[in-house]
Amino acid sequence: MIIWGVGVYAFSFIKDDIPKQLNTESMLLSSEPVEGGLENGEKAIKDIIHDTQKRVVQIELANEALGSGFLYNDQGDIVTNAHVVAGATEVQIKTRDNREFAGTVIGLSETIDVAVVRVDGLKGAEPLKVSRENHAEVGDEVLAFGSPLGYQNTVTTGIISGVSRAFEVPPFQYEDMYQISAPIAPGNSGGPLIHRQTGEVLGINSASAEQGVIGFSIPMPNVIELIEGWSKQPLTTLPTIEITTDIYQQDTLSDEDYAQFLVSYFYESLDVKDYVTAYSLLGSESQGNLSYEKFREGYIDTKGVMIDELSVQTDEEIIVTAVITAKERKNGSETNSQYKVTYKVGYENDDMKILSGRGEVLE
């Protein structure tokens, strides 16, 4: 009886009195935003990356040209750029888990750099959520997905750095474009531009200038009607498109361009805590001297990384020098530290890797 009585009293105390002593409502139960937490409608960045990558595909043509695309409806329709699939009626689609499907081009514009590929093998799959009406604003944080330089399912981070940009890359007219700071390289074309807080598709990554520094993306509200029209009534005859410029061609990139993107990609991966991808960019000798566990442990207290300066020198070797600012957790508090890092970059089995590196702390 004593034990039973104590149990009843303890239950009553926990149920009624303890909640009254709490200063704030539980974040798990509260429907209101909590300062320092995620706002309503926001997702954790890792969840957004994971969910998006499952719905981003690599597109390969018969001539081995590569591009990207994303699943936008449950009919198996993939949105991409027109210049990615120009001249093709059938393409090969590769998903994140290395499944391969045949795709048929059902929509292609001669003037707007947009196309749709239907993949019967992906019918019924859950698509990405698309921002159909709302336009992004300068300062919005974004994630650019694609397969730049053949690195499948890459994610790079940035912001909307400009809006309403217009230019011409024959035969296409680019109007009302988003300018983005996320690094863009060949192979990114056709991939989705994702809102970092909501996970919605804001645009279609389409072109770049000053390789790896400035990118441009087509706003989804501007082309959603065209895309949905093709999905409802696929084209029976595709227009003939002649790509008269080599801006999209992967083989025009120099080793300096590849090296610059590789190091940028390395730090982008660390910034979003994707240690597996960052480690995969190291050469075999570096991996042999440093296990993945030790590599991850070395960055576990790094909260964020930003590249301040980046330069490439080539002579007999490719040397990339970067100045980075790292937000680190030290002795229970966060501090910003600046480093100068120098990497030797080269090819292993036809893939460019970070072969070795050294760094120093800057005051």
Image: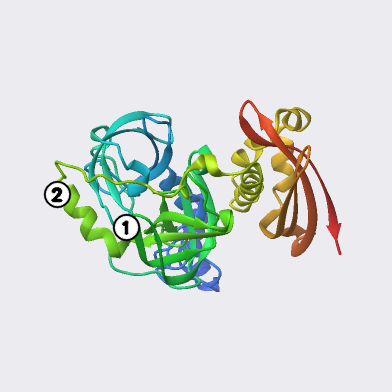
- The structure residue drawn at horizontal position 57% and vertical position 54%, both measured from the top left corner, is 211
Q: Nearer the viewer, residue 315 or 320?
A: 315
**Mark 2 or mark 1: which is in front?**
2
Furthest residue toward front: 244
Q: Amino acid at mark 2?
A: Lys
Residue 291 in the image, given as x and y percentages of width and height: 73, 32
**Disc number placed over residue 130 in the picture, else none:** 1
- Please count the marks in the image: 2
Residue 331 in the image, given as x and y percentages of width and height: 80, 59
Judged left or right of residue 339, residue 43 is: left
- The structure residue drawn at horizontal position 64% and vertical position 35%, both measured from the top left corner, is 352
Q: Amino acid at mark 1?
A: Val
**Disc number placed over residue 180 in the picture, else none:** none
Residue 254 in the image, given as x and y percentages of width and height: 62, 43
- Asked where in the image residue 182 lies, by quadrant, the reply is bottom right
Q: Residues within 10 Å of mark 2 (few under 14, many from 20)?
A: few
**Disc number placed over residue 232 in the picture, else none:** 2
- Asked where in the image residue 305 lies, by quadrant, the reply is bottom right
Query: Is residue 33 visible in this depiction of the protein?
Result: no
Q: Residues within 10 Å of mark 1 (few under 14, many from 20)?
A: some
Judged left or right of residue 327, residue 93 is: left
- The structure residue drawn at horizontal position 52% and vertical position 53%, both measured from the top left corner, is 184
Query: Is residue 233 visible in this depiction of the protein?
Result: yes
- The structure residue drawn at horizontal position 40% and vertical position 66%, both measured from the top left corner, is 177
Judged left or right of residue 185, residue 113 is: left
